[in-house]
Amino acid sequence: MDQAAQLTPTLNIGVDNLQNSGTLSQTKVLFGVKRPQSSSGVLSIITPIKNLNPFQTRWTIKFCVTIKKEIHQYNKQAGNGRVFSFDIIDSEGTKTHVSGFNNMADTHYGNIHIGATYKISGGVVKTANKIYNKLNSGIEITLVPESIVTPCEDGPSIPKNHFSFMPINEILEQSNNSVIDVIGVVICVEPSSTIRRRDGTKVIRRTIKLLDMSRTTIEVTIWGAPSEKEGVQLQQKYYLQETIILAIKSGRVCEYNGKVLSTSSNTHLILNPAILEANKLRTWFDQNLSDTHEPSVKYASLPPPIT
């Protein structure tokens, strides 16, 4: 036996006993250490997202999905393709961005749901491009054919929707292009419409109005696919005179004859979220419906689209 082999440690974890008991179907040996692996191929040891680095080849993370984006086409000199991405947060509050290209987008898009908890085992870890990815992990993940994505029971340690809500009256003090979270009662939903951008492309938009416990209203323009997807749900509930609570994650502050909010590709809309803030807002609105009023501040209804 050579000297390197003698110096390589081996961890005896009683694999045979575990396999016989049915709790472990197989093991993988990495750097001389036997590591437990489930029958699905997912390592049973969970790695915090903050500990991932580009030099790791085998790891499993557990997380909650906070934002899911639609599949979109891209055109580059290297070729055309499709990409799907979603943002995640783990039990320590570390966030990162996960992407899947082409076949990976097709494979995983329908299986990823906002608010659900999953494990990912394997993928390409690279340093985040801070121009486009401002999440706090400093890395991002790309799914590959060997990546294993499995749903799992969400434990109480996985944060659900990680918001930092700003009262609507404080939005008036924010500078243009500030990105904020807000929650309010939907008190107006307009039909969707289509406009043409300066470059000739068309985009769908829908305008709604929110009211919160600061007794302030603000108009929000929803652009693109969400104006039809979540927008239709809002319109149906509004016409049925239901009390609708809407949480907006990463809305953008704009100046257009006053402060308004606009969605972008990073914005996420959640209807009637199951959180404490929504319950308090609903109770306040239902108890004070006849006493609500709009402030003297005038808001514009249609800010320019975010491209």
Image (cartoon, helix red, strand yellow):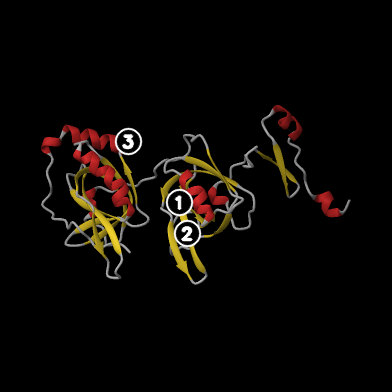
Three-letter amino acid code of the residue under disc 1: Phe
Secondary element under disc 1, as helix, strand or loop, is strand
Q: Is residue 255 left or right of residue 106?
A: left
Q: Which residue is mark 3?
A: 276
Q: Which residue is mark 2?
A: 82
Q: Quadrant of the C terminus?
A: bottom left
Query: Which numbered disc, 1 or 3, marks the residue that appears first in the sequence?
Result: 1
Mark 2–mark 3 distance (CA, rounded to whole Å): 38 Å
Above or below, 20 against 294 in this view is: above
Coordinates of residue 238 in the picture (x, y in percent):
21, 40
Task: Classify 10 Å Cα crowding around label 1: few (below 14), some (14-19), many (20 and above).
Answer: many
Q: Position of residue 32 (x, y in %)?
A: 76, 47
Q: Position of residue 189 (x, y in %)?
A: 20, 47
Q: Are marks 2 and 3 in contact (CB under 8 Å)?
A: no
The single residue placed furthest to the bottom in the displayed view is: 77
Residue 272 coordinates in the image, percent (x, y): 30, 38
- Which marked residue is nearer to the observer: mark 1 or mark 3? 1
Residue at image mark 1: 86
